[in-house]
Image (cartoon, rainbow, N blue to C red):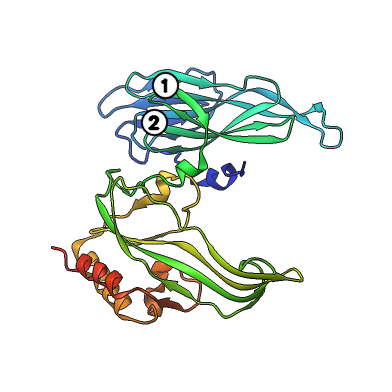
Amino acid sequence: MKKLFFFIFTLSISSNLLIAADINLRNGDLFVSNSGEKEEALTNSGGKIIKYFLSPSEKYVACTKKIGLLPETDLSSGKADPTNTSDAYSIVIIDLQSKKVIKELAPSSSGLNFYIGSWLFPNRLWFLQSDCKNQKDQDLVYDADQGKLKDLDLEEETSAPLPLTDEKSGSFIARALIIPRYSAFKGVSSGAGHGSGFDTGKDFIARSFIYKKGEKFKREADTTSGVTIAGFFVGENVRMIGIAVFAPGYEPKFISDLFRPRVPSTFQLKPISSKEWTHELDSLKLIVNADVVPDAKSLIFFDCNCEILNRMTPAEKEIIYGFINEK
């Protein structure tokens, strides 16, 4: 299994970004107060809560709770070393309406440890089970609504709908224009178009479409053609780098994290004024009418100081014109 957790850890939601109530971590325990109400304790762990993660729906909060010490494994012998320990954790999930613990996920045997990754839509907690003894990690998902635990299905998660949401309100965005960006390799490299070598390929944008809320979306697989000679690849490779998202009334955003589970914070869009949105539409007109994306607009497509060609077909350009002219 791919070790996805460590990449995503820094993207986790660990604040009161969308919640109406005020949650505070103080002296190792969580406290909550609604507007005008007296603060009350959410946990009574005796100071063992380390951090917390709010679900996108604001219905649940998950806490990392220190439960003891875990012997480290000696890599040379493969045996536990009681003289060398690290903190052991469980995961506590609380229903914010009832203010009750609905689940505590605790290691079932010695050598196991739990680490929270992120909430996924709608109310599913992604976390890592680390087997220190056998040096194995496992990505798991707990569905707080259904009370079910299962392995993380990467194929299912990376084919899920795009959770495009308003950064301030948390509401889902109904539709958006998507313009993918691709990287094309042509030449000789030490990998299938990924390693170092001689490259005459170009980056480009193409295959624009209108995305509607709830539709499944999966990043296109790389296309490769060529041969390997003496350890070097000779041929062509095209891969999707990411997508530029244009939603009416929001700042355009480039999203490259498409082959990992849909972490909500990655797909939040920032609201802008009508004047600012008109400016973005003017920029979009310049992009669609140019053979090469203007330098000043290339940041929308994750600028890397390289030329970005416009390879959209007339039909794809018509989709963008229709989007621009919407009332």
Give the residue type at disc 1: Leu
Q: Secondary structure at mark 2?
A: strand
State the residue at coordinates (27%, 71%). Answer: 315
Q: Is residue 305 left or right of residue 134?
A: left
Q: Report which quarter residue 251 is drawn in.
A: bottom left
Q: Residues within 10 Å of mark 2 (few under 14, many from 20)?
A: many
Q: Nearer the viewer, residue 301 or 231?
A: 231
Residue 23 numbered mark, or none: 2
Q: Are marks 2 and 1 in contact (CB under 8 Å)?
A: yes
In the displayed structure, would residue 103 be above or below residue 205? above
Image coords of residue 157 (percent x, y): 46, 42
Residue named by callout 1: 42
Residue at mark 2 to residue at mark 1: CA–CA distance = 9 Å
Q: Residue at x 13, y 63 (%)?
A: 327
Percent coordinates x, y for residue 168 in the rendering: 29, 47
Identity of the amino acid at label 2?
A: Ile
